[in-house]
Amino acid sequence: MKMENMLFSGPDPTKLEGLVHDIYSELVDDACLGLCFEVHRAVKQGYFFLDETDQESMKEFEIVDQPGVDIFGQVYNQWKNKECECPNCKRLIAASRFAPHLEKCLGMGRNSSRIANRRLATNNNVSKSESDQEDNDDLNDNDWSYGAEKKAKKRKSDKNQNSPRRSKSLKHKNGELGSNITSEPYKFSSQYNYNPGVNYETLGPDEVRSLLTTQCGVISEHTKKMCTRSQRCPQHTDEQRRAVRVFLLGPSAPPFPDAGATTVENDSFDIPDTQTLMHRLQWEDSPDISPADSASSKASTNHSDSRKPKKKKPTSGLSSGGVGSLTGGSSSSSSSSSQINVSLANKKKRPKLSAPLIPTIYNELN
Amino acid sequence: MNKDSQMRAAINQKLIEMGERERLKELLRTKLVECGWKDQMKAHCKDVIREKGLEHVTVEDLVTEVTPKGRALVPDSVKKELLQRIRAFLAQHATL
């Protein structure tokens, strides 16, 4: 309209160009003014110089850009040696093991309550019965509620607590303890039940004595370790047990508790006895046998027995058998001799296992 | 003279009415930020403020100190583009 007319009427392009430049400079001034307002506001609000720091701190916290070093100028392999203090037990744990430790220490996780209980039991050193421990276990399991859902699960599993699976796990626990103990042979006393063996060479005399009063103790030929089962263990004979006691404790050893009729039978298996047996057979062949002779033979057997210090009653089955044959008179010498032969065969069978051990023991004693 | 100022006012009105002025302003601002003009200006503002003291700075001081430098620092490419846009606008509306 008006403007167009004016523009058209304004013929000189220099005027138009001046107009364009004016508009442009106005725009630039606007921009400058906007910036000035912005800066002024920032200054008055106090955040204009926030991005600036003094030169010292700039130098101090300069970013380091060198190979093998992090941006703070530290060697970054040192994390390996880092240790963290456990907030629960105040121990220093290697950083890489910290998470597993915390899980156990704080009582999260599946086995934690069991582990904690075990630790408590060992710390208190209270010889709790297994059932007691189990009760505690359950208690803790129920106390710790991870969530409603988990609790429901627990309830379910509580029903099965009397199942053999549970006792099995307990046994396994004891087994673990036993295997732990074998690594330190001096602490064998309480967990001998599941201990595969104790090296007798590493034990002191007192320990040996206490060990032998509670357990079998027969030294295995293969592993050279002592059996740690009870004194009634079926794998070894009383004969073997006794021999080991003589070997380890010497002549002053206390008698084996089971020393009775059975042990007396076993006594007869050794070389001097067989020799007397031979004598007896010869005597019985000869008709003029006298009680005095038999007594002397008895004495000789007694003498040979007395060298073995453990026997309380040195009356051997053999000699009694001899007496029996004597009292029975010379009714049938052949039958009695056959009897002796049978008993001898029996005796030879029984102590087979200990046979290689016994001569060495006697050599030592002599 | 009167005619000239009349024409000027008419053009400005047209620029504002059409919204072209706002568009041009926005274009200029982005271009200036892109080319680093704003950072340069801020640095200059800092110098000015340090000189005057943080408490005594006024907007007028800043404008008088900063605007001449601001005009001078606008890159040629930005200036050329802006002038081109204005010319095109004027030509468009002059021909109508």
Image: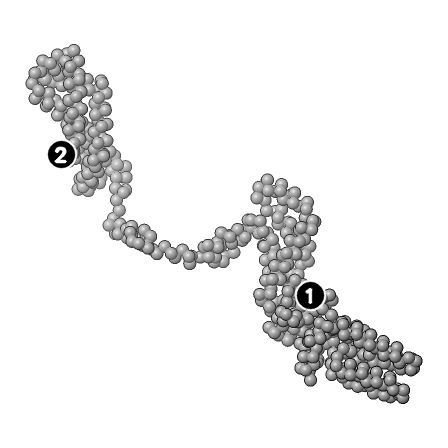
Q: Residue at 25% of width from left, 39% of height from top?
A: A48
| Chain where mark 2 sits | B
Pick the residue in front: A188 or A290: A290
| Chain where mark 1 sits | A
Name the amino acid type tagged 2.
Ala
The residue indicated by pointer 2 is B72
Name the amino acid type tagged 1.
Arg
Quarter of the image with the N terminus of chain A in it: top left
Residue A279 horizontal/vertical position (percent): 81, 85
The residue indicated by pointer 1 is A229
Query: Tag 1, which secondary structure?
Result: loop
Q: Are marks 2 and 1 in contact (CB under 8 Å)?
A: no
Q: Residue at 80% of width from left, 76% of height from top?
A: A344
Quarter of the image with the C terminus of chain A in it: bottom right
Q: Residue at 70% of width from left, 69% of height from top?
A: A216
Is residue A154 shown to the viewer in this render?
A: yes
Residue A261 horizontal/vertical position (percent): 81, 73
**Relative to A33, is A49 above or below?**
below
Pick the residue in front: A263 or A186: A263
